[in-house]
Amino acid sequence: MAEHGPRVAGPGDRARLRILLEVIKAMSAETDFERLLQLIMEETTRAMEADRSTLFLVDHERGELWSRIALGLKERKEIRFKSHLGIAGHVATTGEPLNIPEAYEDPRFNQEVDRQTGYRTRTILCMPVRNKAGSIVGALQVLNKRAGVFTPADEEMLDALASQAAIALENAKLYEDLRKAYEELKQLDAMKGNFLANISHELRTPLAPIIGYVEMLLSARPGPLTDRQRSHLQVVEQAVQRLQGLIEDLLAFVQMEQGELLLQTRPFAIAALLEERARVLTPRATEKGLTVEVAVPSGLPDVQVDPKQISRALMLLLDNAIKFTPPGGRIALGAKAHVAPDDAPPGWPHGYVEVSLSDTGIGIPADKIPRIFEKFYQVDASTTRSYGGTGLGLALVKQIMEAHGTRLAVESTPGVGSTFRLRLPIAHPYA
C-alpha cells in the first residue's frame, strides 16, 4: 500500500484560500443586516463560481425558511416556505449538507420555483448555517456551477463560507439590537427632558402669584401684621423660595441636557461673588447652628466666566454643604490665585483662581465619590428622606464646570467632612 504524505497546497488551493480570506474580511466589516445578506449572496456566488445564491434563515416561530434576497432573480421579494420543504428545508431540518449533480433527478427538489421563474436548475450545493451554539439558523444554497458540478473542494469552501456567514449574521443582529436599543433610549431621554421642562414651566406659573402675594403681605401694604402672622408668612416665604430654587435647578439641568445652555463669559470679580453668596446663606447656616468662614485674599484677579452660571454653581455647593453638615459644624469658603502655573489647562495663559469649599459634614465614602456627580444619584437612599433634594445639585455643578472647560474636584472622609475645589480661568488683564 502506497504511503501518502501531507497534501501540498496547489495553485487552486491558494486561490481559494485568498478568495475565502477576502470574503471573511468583507463580511466582518459589514454591520447592517440587510446589506450583509446582500453581501453574503454576492460573495458566495463569486467564490463558488455559481449562477445563483440564496441564504435561507429559520423562522422558528412560524416553522418556515425565509429569504429576502435571492441573488440572480430579477425581482427581489421575500421568499417563505415550510421549513421541511425542498433542498434547503431538508438541509435546515437534518443538518446534512447536500451536493446534487442533477436537480430534476432528486425527489426532494421543488420544481415549482423553476416553473414560476423560468430558470433551469441543474446542480445544487447546500450547507447548513450554524450559530456558535451549534444550532441551525439557516441554509446557504448555490445553484448551477458554471463549469461542471460542485466538487468536494467546493463543499469545503461553502462550509467555510456558511460558518463565517453565521458569525457575521450574529454580529450584525447584535449590532442592530444595540442600535435600536440606543435609539429607544435617546427617544426616552428626549421625552424625559421635554416632560421635565414642561412640568417645570407649569410649576413656575402658579408659583409667581404666590411669591407676589406673600411679599405684598409681608410688606404690610394691605395692613399691619401681628408678630405671629409675620412669622407664619416668613415660613411660607422660605418654603416657596426653596421650591422656586428646585424648579430653577431642574430647568437649568434640562437646558444643559438638551444642549441649550449657552455661556456668556466675561471678566468677572469672583471675590465679590464669593462674599455675596456666603452672606446670603449665612442666616440659614446660623439658624442650623453652623459657623461660616470666608477667606478671600485682597487683590484676587478677575476670572473669565459666565457670572450667572458660576453663581448658581456656588449656591448649589454652599446649599449642599449646609444640608449635609450637622449642627455645630463649620463651613469654610476660600480662594487662591495661581498665576501662570505649569498645571494650568491649555488656553488659560494667565493661570486660574482655585475656589475651595470645605465642611465638617457627613462625608462621602471613597468608592462613592466618582458617582456623586451623576444625576439623581444619592450615596444612600436614606439621605433623600433625611436631607431632601432632587439629586441634581452636584450633577448640575459638574455640567457648569465642564461647560467652562474645567472640572470639580472633591476630597472627602466619612464622618470628617468634604472639600470641593473648582478652578476658574483668570481673565486677560486688558479685557
Image (cartoon, grey):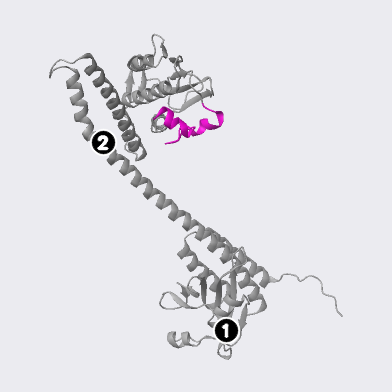
Q: Residue at x 57, y 89 (%)?
A: 107
Q: Residue furthest top?
A: 298
- Residue to which mark 2 is pinned: 203
Q: Is residue 149 visible?
A: no
- Secondary-structure class at tag 2: helix
- Quarter of the image for the C terminus: give it: top left
Which is more foreground, mark 2 or mark 1?
2
* Residues rendered magenta in the picture: 364-388
- Quarter of the image for the N terminus: give it: bottom right
- Secondary-structure class at tag 1: loop
* In this view, 249 is above or below 89: above
In the rendered image, residue 386 lying in the magenta stretch gets the answer yes
Front position in the image: 347 or 290: 290
| Residue 427, percent from left and from top | 37, 20
- Residue to which mark 1 is pinned: 123
| Residue 245, percent from left and from top | 31, 28
In the displayed structure image, the side of residue 175 where residue 292 appears, left or right = left
Q: Is residue 129 visible?
A: yes
In the displayed structure image, the side of residue 241 where residue 158 appears, left or right = right
* Mark 2 residue crowding within 10 angstroms, few (<14) / some (14–19) / many (20+): some
Q: Quadrant of residue 307?
A: top left
Q: Residue at x 47, y 87 (%)?
A: 112
Amino acid type at circle 1 is: Thr
